[in-house]
Amino acid sequence: MEKASLSELIDEPQARAEAGAEAMTEAALARLADVGGQINAFISVRAEEALAEAREIDARRERGEPLGALAGLPIAVKDNIDVAGCPATAGSSFLADRVPDADAEVVRRLRAADAVVIGKTGLHELAYGVTSNNPHYGPVRNPWDTTRIPGGSSGGSGAALGADICVLALGTDTGGSVRIPAALNGVCGLRPTYGSISTRGTVPVCASLDTVGPMARSMRDVALLHRVIRGYDRADPWAMQAPCGGDDGATAGRDGVAGLRIALASGFFAEEVQPEVSRCVRTAAEQFAALGAEVSEREIPGAQEAVSITNRLVLADALSVHAERLERDPDGFGEDVRRRLELGREVSGVDVMRAIAAMRGWHARMLEHFEQIDLLLLPSTLTTAPPIEGSEMISTTALLTRFTYPWSLAWLPGGSIPCGFDDRGLPIGLQLVAAPWRDELILRAGEAYQRVTDWHLRRPPLRRGAQAGAR
């Protein structure tokens, strides 16, 4: 058969099986060669290793051996997640020469499912910011407009997906680092229920909030990846076991959104929102109603305080991880990350304990809300992608995490799906939030929405051979 482009293979699952692992990997690497220089999404590429792994998968297929659920699918892995034999820099000068000899648990599960890791994606330094403007490896750029940020900290994973360089990607999400780049790059991402996916083998930011999240162009593929990497890891001290029944018990045998109680968040989550973002999110809520959901509006008191509490916890925890380096070699950090780490010194032990108590109270109040609703809808971010130039990291992080921090603090799952574009042609993300362990409900609703919309199928205006920063 004639070779298909990776874009065609991404959109047509049947075509993937017909193409084979080697053809998909070659298509991914060819796309990277064509447009990768415009967006700087990768820190390292495993071209030879990936092709060898893909050929072995095809050989096993030819022998009639059973293959995993992700057989031959090219996946990009954020560079704060260990892949054996591949540099794992976390976007930092301190870890520039670090090459782990073992896979992170999530990568082990990817390999067991026969995915092909094509490379490690760029990120904000140490996953501690949302611009992905990295002083050590260069800025990651948004494929919809390369003068703009891709979000972060999983900016490389979001940009690689937006540019059709891979079928799947892994990011990490502490306070929004999967959902924000998914929104700004016009793709999908899931922050899972806290503790439901192993973080063993990742560089931490704030272990009490850190998660690993699946990303893809469609929620269908996010769900496919999620089902492979989720599950208890007894060797991960932060892992949690699902209650009896878990996700599958809540959604077994069901499809679509008919009868679901969906609330459009109002109050704090409707303030200071870019008008096009507000319009697209409201239109999405109307679409869910047309699909049979019971849609209402709901205010969530205390959300602004939840943002402040999350900020205090992240500042303190991140400093605890990097305090020795900061004392020994402050100039080894990028200026923005160094300043943010130093802010952690202003958070006292008393502040941390009060924040933890407030976090538990916020979690309990969110459980009460989700006794009355199934899903909460709101913007993923209150604005589309800001320009790289002039995006000061600390203030931009505060801007873009406003609608993601509260759900991280409550340990809730949250997903972002494309729901439109602003008048500059920049993607807009819709965030869906559910009760703990109901990740599958988010995925199910997202898939239902994407069966009747095409926002996730639209492609950015990247041109082969164009220069970075040009439209």
Image (tube, rainbow, N blue to C red):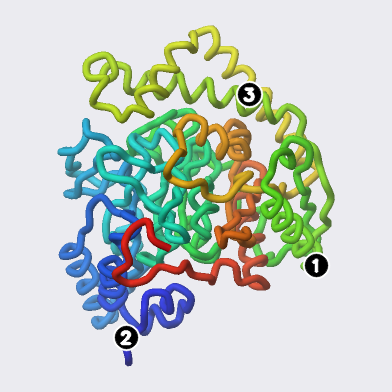
Q: Quadrant of residue 113?
A: bottom left
Give the side of residue 358 with respect to residue 343, left or right.
right
Helix, strand or loop for disc 2: loop
Residue at left offset 50%, top offset 32%:
209
Q: Which residue is mark 2?
A: 3
Give the side of residue 304 with respect to residue 389, left or right.
right
Give the x, y percent position of residue 36.
Answer: 30, 62
Q: Earlier in the sequence, mark 3 or mark 2?
A: 2
Q: Quadrant of residue 101?
A: top left
Give the x, y percent position of residue 46.
Answer: 20, 59
Q: Which residue is mark 3?
A: 360
Q: Earlier in the sequence, mark 1 or mark 3?
A: 1
Front residue (pair 303, 60): 303
Give the side of residue 214 with respect to residue 412, left or right.
left
Residue at left offset 72%, top offset 47%:
376
Question: Is residue 11 at least partly visible in the picture?
Answer: yes
Front residue (pair 464, 225): 464
Front residue (pair 403, 207): 403
Q: Which residue is mark 1?
A: 290
Q: Give the vertical position of 348 relative to 3 (above or below).
A: above
Type of amino acid under label 2: Lys
The residues bearing labels 2 and 1 have C-alpha atoms spaced at a distance of 39 Å
Type of amino acid under label 1: Ala
Give the x, y percent position of residue 116.
Answer: 29, 64
Type of amino acid under label 3: Arg
Residue at left offset 44%, top offset 62%:
162
Q: Give the vertical position of 355 relative to 82 (above or below).
A: above
Q: Earlier in the sequence, mark 2 or mark 1?
A: 2
Number of other residues with Cα within 10 Å of mark 2, as a class: few under 14, some 14 to 19, many 20 or more: few
